[in-house]
Image (cartoon, rainbow, N blue to C red):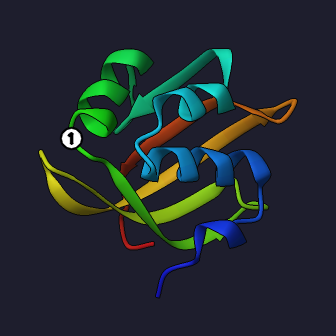
Amino acid sequence: MTIPVEQLSDPAVRAFVTALNANDRAAFFGVLSPDATMADDGSERDLGEWTEREVFSSAGHMDVEAESDDGRELVATYRNDTWGAMRTAWRFTVDGGKVSRFETGQAGGV
């Protein structure tokens, strides 16, 4: 069962998922702090390069299955044209209403 994006608890995370699913670069980068960072499977990544490859040029999309930590931790089925669908975990740091960091990777037995 998926959680409708508009029902996600944290407003910044909700805006992040909404922009990602709409493939809207301007809205996506608008929800990030200017110095935002990210990691994928525990490795630091260049946010611009990663999002272009894994989100925008490959039609990335999140279907959120569960949230915790006041909406700042998600489990979602993430799919894109490169990798297909996989179960992923996402953790967000939000400062001043903006996402300053996100970490993602394959979800274990969550």
The percent position of residue 73, horizontal first and vertical second, equals 62, 56
Out of 52 and 23, give the one closest to the viewer: 23
Q: Residues within 10 Å of mark 1 (few under 14, many from 20)?
A: some
For residue 97, side relative to residue 41 (left or right): right
Q: Is residue 80 above or below residue 50?
A: below
For residue 50, side relative to residue 97 (left or right): left
> In the picture, residue 68 is in which quadrant?
bottom right
Q: Residue at x 78, y 52 (%)?
A: 11
Q: Residue at x 21, y 63 (%)?
A: 85
Q: Residue at x 68, y 68 (%)?
A: 6
The amino acid type found where label 1 is placed reads: Ser
The percent position of residue 60, horizontal first and vertical second, equals 31, 48
- Identify the residue under disc 1: 58
Q: Residue at x 59, y 34 (%)?
A: 27
Q: Is residue 102 above or below residue 74?
A: above
> In the picture, residue 53 is in which quadrant?
top left
Residue situated furthest right in the rendering: 96
